[in-house]
Amino acid sequence: MSTDEQFRKMLGGYSLTTAEILYHLPDHRSLLQIYIWQEYDLFPEFPNLWKFLKFWHTRLDGPLHSVRVAHEQLITRREIRVIEKEFHIH
């Protein structure tokens, strides 16, 4: 994803989302492993994370134990303002 695409997503309300996914190893169900997932996603619905977790549940062998989610809104609407005039001084 290019920097321009990332910036447009942030302006559209996307925020950097990190999920710590704890899952059981397929061959040793008593052992847990951690997988870190990070993507720009919409708070609080997290459609990209839900899509990924659905994929995990249907396609991967290691059953999920738990998921912890953190997000940080990098740009808020109040940080951006429209400049109505621009003056050039020679």
Image (spheres, helix red, strand yellow):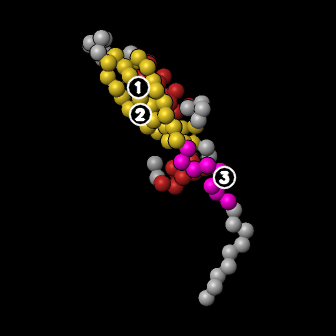
Residue at mark 2: 37
Query: 64 and 71: which one is in front?
Result: 71
C-beta proximity under 8 Å, tags 1 and 2 = yes
Rendered location of residue 60, percent (x, y) = 37, 20
Look at label 3 and name its amino acid.
Arg
Disc 1 designates what residue? 21
Identity of the residue drawn at 69% across and 62% down: 82
Question: Magenta span covers which residues?
Answer: 73-81
- Closer mark to the observer between disc 1 and disc 3: 3
How packed mark 3 is, by other alpha carbons closer than 10 Å (few <14, some 14-19, many 20 or more), is few
Residue 30 horizontal/vertical position (percent): 30, 11
Q: Main secondary structure of the magenta part?
A: loop
Specify few, some or many for label 1: CA neighbours under 10 Å numbering under 14, 14-19, or 20 or more. Answer: some
Separation (CA) of disc 1 from disc 3: 33 Å
Q: Which residue does the image show at 52% across and 55% down from the upper left?
A: 4
Q: Residues within 10 Å of mark 2 (few under 14, many from 20)?
A: few
Q: Residue at the spot x=57%, y=50% of the render?
A: 75
Q: How many marks?
A: 3
Q: Amino acid at mark 2?
A: Trp
Asked if disc 2 and disc 3 are in contact, CB closer than 8 Å, the reply is no
Q: Secondary structure at mark 1?
A: strand
Q: CA distance from mark 2 to mark 3?
A: 28 Å
Tell me what residue is drawn at x 64 percent, y 82 percent.
88
Q: Amino acid at mark 1?
A: Ile
Within the magenta stretch, is there residue 76?
yes
The residue where tag 3 is placed is 78
Q: Earlier in the sequence, mark 2 or mark 3?
A: 2
Disc 3 is placed on an element classified as helix
